[in-house]
Amino acid sequence: MEMDSFWHLIEGSWRHTADPDERLEWLTTQLSQLPPAEMVDFQVWLDRLHRWADSWQMWGAAYQLCDGLCSVDGFWYFQAWLVGLGRDAFERAVADPDVLADVAQVRRLASLGVDNWSEDEWPEWESLDYVAGRAYALVTGEDEGFEEAIEARGHDSQLSPEPTGERWDFEDAAEVARRFPRLSEMFPLSARADRPGLGLEAFGQGPDEDFFRQMAGER
């Protein structure tokens, strides 16, 4: 499976339905019609796209969009949601996350307000990470075979964020406005009590694990 074929499936699922669960069912059906090796290809491409979107800059955009409710897991699922937007939106957002302000789904989220998002509307798509493995198990009857096939390919699947680039203060309003002039206007951070409110001091000067532990309890 080439990258074009991967994106054809992702975008085909969107043309089929906007419902994330129904998109997964459609993808499972489509993948189940392919050779098992192409199901592995699908996962390898998805993992690569995770890595391309896995930056402190993108995390800052996700943090702003979600009113600070974007933990380690939440950012990982946000990356999958970005993939679900399709190739053009994904590639443009990776180059400059502020262009998410042009995406129709993002503009709708801004019009509703974070407290009014339904579960299906949250910008995260965790289950996309499992769809290829699900199709593989259905076709081969091997629950563990998918991971073994990925390892046999010499591919190492990343399971959580390892962001690249410069760590910066997501709570610094001036810095946020400089990096994301449109997103910062569309999604101003509130004073909500349940927002982590983590600035650069939470990142610290030590290992990233200190920051991850503090964020792990939030969405």
Image (cartoon, rainbow, N blue to C red):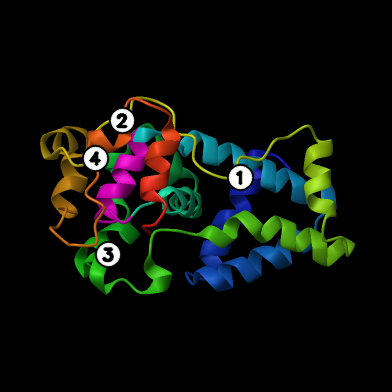
- Residue drawn at x 42%, y 54% is 74
Q: Mark 2 near mark 4, Cβ–Cβ under 8 Å?
A: no
The residue identified by callout 4 is 170
Q: Considering only order in the chain, which callout, 3 or 2, is on the residue closer to the N terminus?
A: 3
Q: Considering only order in the chain, which callout, 1 or 3, is on the residue closer to the N terminus?
A: 1
Q: Out of 215 and 185, give the one closest to the viewer.
A: 215
Q: Is residue 53 left or right of residue 186?
A: right
- Of the residues shown, which amino acid type is indicated by label 4? Phe
- Of the residues shown, which amino acid type is indicated by label 1? Leu
Q: Which mark is residue 46?
A: 1
Judge whether residue 100 can be spotted in this image. Answer: no
Q: Which mark is residue 204?
A: 2
Would you identify the image quadrant in which residue 142 lies?
A: bottom right
Q: Mark 2 near mark 3, Cβ–Cβ under 8 Å?
A: no
- Vertical position of residue 62 compared to residue 19: above or below: above
User: How far apart, in angstroms, are the residues tagged by discs 2 and 4?
Assistant: 13 Å
- Residue drawn at x 58%, y 55% is 10
Q: Which tag is nearer the camera, tag 2 or tag 4?
A: 2
Q: What is the span of residues highlighted in magenta in the rendered image?
A: 57-69
Q: Considering only order in the chain, which callout, 4 or 1, is on the residue closer to the N terminus?
A: 1
User: How far apart, in angstroms, are the residues tagged by discs 1 and 4?
Assistant: 27 Å
Helix, strand or loop under label 2? loop
The residue identified by callout 3 is 108
